[in-house]
Amino acid sequence: MAEPLVIVERQGATARLILNRPDRLNALTAPLLQALTQALDRLESDLSVRALLLTGAGRAFSAGQDLDEPGVMDAGDLPAALHHTLENNYHPAAMALRLHRCPVVVAINGIAAGAGCNLALAGDFVLASEEAGLLQAFARIGLIPDCGGTWLLPRLIGEARARQLAFLAEPLSARQAEAWGLINRAVPADRLLDEAQALAERLATGPTRAYQLMKRAFAESWSNGYSHQLGLEAELQRLAGASTDFAEGVAAFRAKRTPGFTGC
Ligand code: T3D
């Protein structure tokens, strides 16, 4: 039987998704992206899962679009094929990741290039091996950063650094990425998965509904003015206030004990 393109492993209330084309540095193809979207969608509706961890198999996180992908890279109308695969394969995967009900921890285990880099940056927490590099490879082949790159980069690191990464297409070390605030933490390679898993497990015991609402508030903040955002916060707080976890959090505070959040 063929190896799955995305391996999903359950560990308690966390689910680990592993991009699995190690012989091609987990380069992205339509079937792989569709498998990722389907896995994320399944986990969206499985309420027993409360945090996700995304990583890559082998020595890379992902080398971005597979530059040999049949039907895309050899299409008669290549520009149309690029547009089509972005709309139909990349964007559903990026949206499913970015707006997932669960917090998403990304563990960049090796090079993250092109769209592979920008998929990684769509996570809520990004940890990287000290041996990994982040590469906006697009300009090397005459393309622009896609898969959310032109949206995420200036917001995470400011326009000057975003332009530097995009125009020069030079790899950024994990340590520099941490110093710039592009990722949360660079960690020794042999500790990456343990630290990412520990973070995912911690998040899996948190107030899942509140996390989901926070993700929405942060996402919408970029297009809102201050007063509009205050209104959104009030609306979302109404939803958070209806959760069992809010009642539990307040009860635990009053009883001077640790809350036992259930994610509801
Ligand atoms: O709409 C659309 O479809 C367009 C969307 C575009 C989004 C994008 O992601 S564009 C950017 C695409 N990615 C790249 O341009 C990166 C290409 N790869 C590299 O620059 C380098 O491979 C890396 C810097 C990622 C890693 O370098 P290194 O020296 O560690 O490994 P390597 O020797 O270059 O690669 C190992 C193998 O993987 C090699 O195959 P071989 O010679 O062993 O048979 C190489 O060809 C293959 N590989 C690496 N990246 C890709 C790839 N094969 C297909 N597609 C790749 N992207």
Image (cartoon, rainbow, N blue to C red):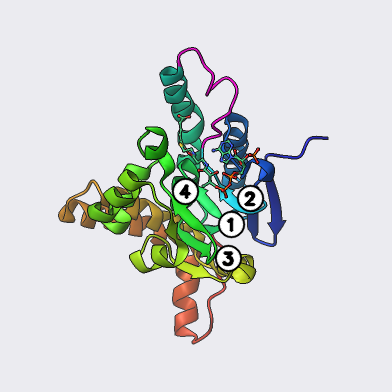
**Residue, disc 1:** 53
Nearest to N terminus: mark 4 or mark 2: 2
Q: Is residue 69 located in the magenta-colored stretch of the structure?
A: yes
Residue shown at the point (45%, 25%) measured from the top left: 82
The amino acid marked with disc number 3 is Ala
The numbered disc on residue 117 is 4
The numbered disc on residue 17 is 2
Residue sitting nearer the eye, 209 or 79: 79
Q: Mark 3 to mark 4: distance in Å? A: 17 Å
Residue sitting nearer the eye, 26 or 259: 26
Q: Mark 2 to mark 1: distance in Å? A: 6 Å
Q: Residues within 10 Å of mark 1 (few under 14, many from 20)?
A: many
**Label pair 3/4, CB-CB below 8 angstroms:** no
**Label pair 2/1, CB-CB below 8 angstroms:** yes
Q: Residues within 10 Å of mark 2 (few under 14, many from 20)?
A: many
Nearest to N terminus: mark 3 or mark 1: 1
Q: Mark 2 to mark 3: distance in Å? A: 12 Å
Q: Label 3: state its secondary structure.
A: helix
The amino acid marked with disc number 4 is Cys
Q: In the image, 205: left or right of 220? A: right
Residue range corresponding to the magenta coloring: 65-77
Nearest to N terminus: mark 3 or mark 4: 4
**Label pair 3/1, CB-CB below 8 angstroms:** yes
Where on the image, by quarter, is ligand 1? top right
Q: Quadrant of residue 14?
A: bottom right
Nearest to N terminus: mark 1 or mark 4: 1
**Residue, disc 3:** 196
Q: Is residue 260 located in the magenta-colored stretch of the structure?
A: no
Q: Is residue 140 above or below residue 122?
A: above
The amino acid marked with disc number 1 is Leu
